[in-house]
Image (tube, helix red, strand yellow):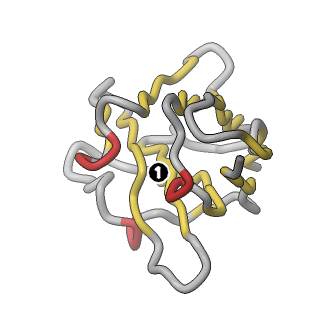
């Protein structure tokens, strides 16, 4: 089960923190990630976190977005700062489980569990 939280409305320049709590998995949540999709746009990767501790943020979002994981709570957090109108989208949490060293956490098609999504709307 993936429980997403933290979405909402925010003004440009503001901040939001999205959280994705993963529970009930039989195997390790090897890759966890945030993707987003705006109306009329393709889904895009926002950030990933691999079981090994390696994390990535989409190059276009680096400097504004950071991703972290609370291992004790198996929760993936996305800190969004200096938010822009173009960040408006539905944000989805995804999990690849089980995985291995060879799993490609960057590939959305690898993920086999998806959350319902949480809406982020940026407007003044």
Instruction: Look at the picture and state if 15 lies above or below 9.
Output: above
Residue 122 appears left or right of 58: right
Residue 102 appears left or right of 9: left
Quarter of the image where one finds residue 54? top left
Instruction: Look at the picture and state if 63 lies above or below 118.
Output: above
Q: What residue occupies the far front of the structure in this picture?
A: 124
The residue at the point 47 percent across, 63 percent down is 111
Query: At which x and y percent is residue 67?
Result: 45, 29
Residue 122 appears left or right of 71: right
Query: At which x and y percent is residue 95?
Result: 54, 51
The residue at the point 61 percent across, 58 percent down is 88
Instruction: Look at the picture and state if 51 lies above or below 91.
Output: above
Q: Secondary structure at mark 1?
A: loop
Query: At which x and y percent is residue 96?
Result: 47, 54
Residue beneath disc 1: 98
Residue 78 appears left or right of 122: left
């Amino acid at each position: 089960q993936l429980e997403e939280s933290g979405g909402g409305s925010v003004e440009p320049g503001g901040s939001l923190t999205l959280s994705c709590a993963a529970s009930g998995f039989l195997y390790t949540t090897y890759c966890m990630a945030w993707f987003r999709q705006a109306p009329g746009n393709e889904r895009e990767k926002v950030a990933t976190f691999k079981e090994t501790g390696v994390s990535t943020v989409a190059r276009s979002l680096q400097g504004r977005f950071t991703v972290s994981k609370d291992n004790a709570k198996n929760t993936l957090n996305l800190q969004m700062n200096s938010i822009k109108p173009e960040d408006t989208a539905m944000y989805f949490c995804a999990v690849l489980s089980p995985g291995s060293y060879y799993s490609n956490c960057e590939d959305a098609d690898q993920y086999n569990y998806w959350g319902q999504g949480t809406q982020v709307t940026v407007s003044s």
